[in-house]
Image (cartoon, grey):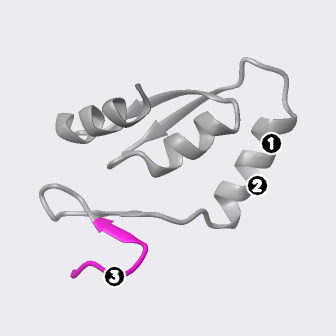
């Protein structure tokens, strides 16, 4: 798979991360925004964390998980 606009290949080129919110993510963000806080979300297989960042901006507390530690470190540095 080659990179396309809106898609970032993962570090080992075995997967990819979308850089756009689809209808499912938009619905989840709307739910987070109208829900009492704290609102906890587990984001599994985060890659570089696009969805995690969107959910954090919406007010969620996010537990991010990925098999590649480098992906988690990239996410952490981008939000700290």
Rendering coords of residue 55 (x, y %): 61, 40
Could you tell me which secondary element the residue under label 2 belongs to?
Answer: helix
Q: Residue at x 71, y 48 (%)?
A: 28
Residue 2 percent coordinates (x, y): 22, 82
Q: Which label's residue is closer to the chain start, 3 or 2?
A: 3
Compare marks 3 and 1 and give the one earlier in the sequence. Answer: 3
Instruction: Answer whether residue 41 is magenta in the image.
Output: no
Q: Nearer the viewer, mark 3 or mark 1?
A: 3
According to the picture, the residue beneath numbered tag 2 turns out to be 27
The residue at 29%/35% (across/down) is 72
Label 1 neighbourhood size at 10 Å, few (<14), some (14-19), many (20+)?
some
The quarter of the image holding the N terminus is: bottom left
Q: Is residue 75 left or right of residue 60?
A: left
For image coordinates 23% across by 39% down, the residue present is: 67
Q: Nearer the viewer, residue 30 or 74?
A: 74
Q: Main secondary structure of the magenta part?
A: loop
Magenta-tinted stretch: 1-8
- Local packing at callout 3 (Cα closer than 10 Å; few below 14, some 14-19, many 20+) is few
Checking the image for residue 4, the label placed there is 3
- Horizontally, residue 26 falls left or right of residue 69, namely right
Tag 1 residue: 31
Taking the spot 25% from the left edge, 42% from the top edge, the residue there is: 71
Quarter holding the C terminus? top left
x, y (%) of residue 75? 35, 37
């Amino acid at each position: 798979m080659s990179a396309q606009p809106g898609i970032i290949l993962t570090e080992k080129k075995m997967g990819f991360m979308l850089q756009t919110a689809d209808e499912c993510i938009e619905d989840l963000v709307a739910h987070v925004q109208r829900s009492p806080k704290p609102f906890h979300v587990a984001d599994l297989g985060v890659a570089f964390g696009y969805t995690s960042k969107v959910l954090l901006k919406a007010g969620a507390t996010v537990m991010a998980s990925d098999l590649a530690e480098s992906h988690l470190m990239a996410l952490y540095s981008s939000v700290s």
